[in-house]
Image (cartoon, helix red, strand yellow):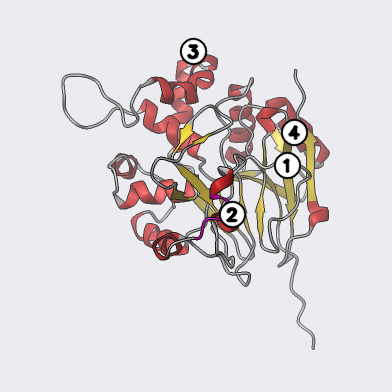
Amino acid sequence: MPVFRSKSQGYDLIGDVHGCALALERLLKKLGYQHVRGCYRHESRKVIFVGDIVDRGPRIREALHIVKDMVDQGQAEIVLGNHEYNAMCYCTQSRDGGLQKTYLREHNARNHRLIRETLEQFEDFGGEWAAFLSWFQQIPLFIEKEHFRVVHACWDQHAIERFRTLSPDHCLSEDLLHASSVEDSFEARLVDRLTRGTALDLPEGETILSKDGYVRKVFRTKFWGTEAETYNDVVFQPDPLPAHLVDRKLSAIERQKLLSYSEHERPVFVGHYWMSGDPEPICANVACLDYSAVKYGKLVAYRMDDEQRLDPAKFVWVDVVRS
């Protein structure tokens, strides 16, 4: 007799929200979710958020409440984004024992700029912000389902397998959070890899002025398998390489620093990378859901069911407008 596989739970994976609460509500409604009994619900589906709910946008507090209410009531899951991680570090005192109060993330102008809008919007809600910071420690760095994976920026199988031995729930405990603030520790490299992706150093003396105003000495790279010969073959970021570096050959050392994600692996969903244009898979089993919502781009979802190869027709989005 034939064996019939039961249909798995359907998930709607949603990209970086960054405080765009009104757009999030519009997207949820477009996906068929209704606000019932304290949160958005669907009769047969659930949401997975790819992280970066905080910072930059106009309604960060409201967005966090929408997301956490869904998670608390079993209607959604979420992975940790680099902005939630930064917030934890910025607001957590170090254990150095000095007389002067210090934090895991230095309170300098650059770091404050990243979290400024979040702190301002919670200025009169200190208790709520403390509760959200505590909740961030309960958010896993990655989610692995039977037929797909979710991580904010990069799936590194070797690092993830090692992290499982340190954290069975895949979250950053207080001790792991402090360990991650130690430069070049495994925990620091793990969080950087999973929430910010892979990168290569630019040649000595070369820089990129990014769209967000930072001067960068590295460029983000693809983490999935590619036949790479030049910088242009591996670059993956909205800011272009300097023209004279596009065709620069990768050195043997640079090649060793690249990751690969086989086309035979289960689909993986990420955010983080500020895509533009109409949403579509990067390749058959890799999708980025960050389409620059907070820059008046698109807030994007993918409706995942049982497919082994991603379907361009299953992306759903709303355009983010000024409000």
Q: Which residues are magenta?
A: 245-249
| Residue at image coords 83%, 54% | 313
Amino acid type at circle 4 is Val
Where residue 228 sits, quadrant-wise, is: bottom right
Please name the residue that numbered disc 2 is placed on.
232
Amino acid type at circle 1 is Val
Residue neighbourhood size for the residue with mark 4, other residues' Cα within 10 Å, grouped as few (<14), some (14–19), many (≥20): few
In this picture, residue 6 sits left or right of residue 210: right
Please name the residue that numbered disc 3 is placed on.
123
Q: Which mark is residue 300?
A: 1
Between the C-alphas of marks 2 and 1, the distance is 26 Å
Q: Secondary structure at mark 4?
A: strand
Give the number of the mark in front: 3 or 4. Answer: 3
First reached walking from the N terminus: tag 3 or tag 2: 3
Is residue 152 at all visible to an observer of this figure?
Answer: no
Between the C-alphas of marks 1 and 3, the distance is 29 Å
Which residue is outermost to the front?
Answer: 244
